[in-house]
C-alpha cells in the first residue's frame, strides 16, 4: 500500500464515515498526507460522499478543499469538477 501511495502522482481519497472508522483506511490516509508533505505538493484530492464531522480528519486535512459529491446533481458537473481537481487548468474533455 505504501509503495502505491508514494509512486502515485495524486491520491484520490473517497471519504465516508465508514472510511474514517477503518483503521486500515486511516493508515492509508496518513500515508497520503505524509507523501503530500514530503513531495511539497497538493497531491491529495478529497471526495466527500456523505456528511461527517471535520474534526474526525487529521489536522493536516481539515482546511483542505473537498469535492462534495452530493452537491452535483448532474453527472457531467461532477466529472468536470473531478477532472479540474486532478488535472488543473489543462484542457481535458469529458
Image (cartoon, helix red, strand yellow):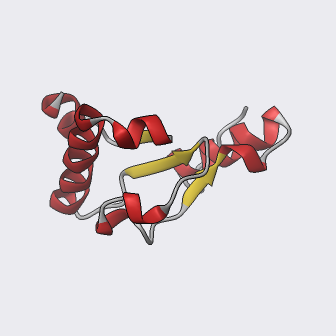
Q: In the image, residue 39 lies at what x, y percent?
A: 20, 57
Question: In the visual, does 93 lie left or right of 55?
Answer: right
Question: In the visual, does 38 lie left or right of 53?
Answer: left
Q: In the image, residue 46 lies at what x, y percent?
A: 48, 49
**The C terminus: image quadrant:** top right
Q: In the image, residue 15 lies at what x, y percent?
A: 48, 43
Q: Is residue 13 or residue 87 the one in the foreground?
A: 13
Vertical order, 53 against 92 (above or below):
below
Q: In the image, residue 23 lies at what x, y percent?
A: 24, 37
Q: Is residue 75 or residue 28 the one in the foreground?
A: 28
- Location of residue 80 by image quarter: top right
Question: In the visual, does 62 lie left or right of 78?
Answer: left
**The N terminus: image quadrant:** top left
Vertical order, 59 against 7 (above or below):
below
Give the residue drawn at x 30%, y 67%: 60
Give the residue drawn at x 19%, y 45%: 31
Asked whether residue 76 appears in the rendered view, the answer is: yes
Asked whether residue 11 appears in the rendered view, the answer is: no
- Location of residue 77 by image quarter: top right
Q: Is residue 4 or residue 9 the one in the foreground?
A: 4
Q: Which residue is farthest bottom?
A: 63
Give the residue drawn at x 85%, y 37%: 74
Give the residue drawn at x 61%, y 44%: 50
- What is the count of numbered marks? 0
Question: In the visual, does 66 lie left or right of 43?
Answer: right
Amino acid at each position: 500500500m505504501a509503495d502505491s501511495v508514494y509512486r502515485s502522482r495524486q491520491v484520490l481519497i473517497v471519504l465516508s464515515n465508514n472510511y474514517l472508522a477503518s483503521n486500515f483506511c486511516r493508515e492509508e490516509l496518513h500515508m497520503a498526507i505524509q507523501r503530500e508533505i514530503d513531495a511539497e505538493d497538493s497531491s491529495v484530492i478529497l471526495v466527500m460522499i456523505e456528511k461527517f464531522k471535520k474534526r474526525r480528519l487529521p489536522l493536516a486535512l481539515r482546511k483542505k478543499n473537498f469535492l462534495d459529491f452530493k452537491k452535483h446533481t448532474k453527472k457531467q458537473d461532477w466529472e468536470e469538477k473531478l477532472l479540474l481537481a486532478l488535472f488543473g487548468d489543462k484542457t481535458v474533455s469529458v
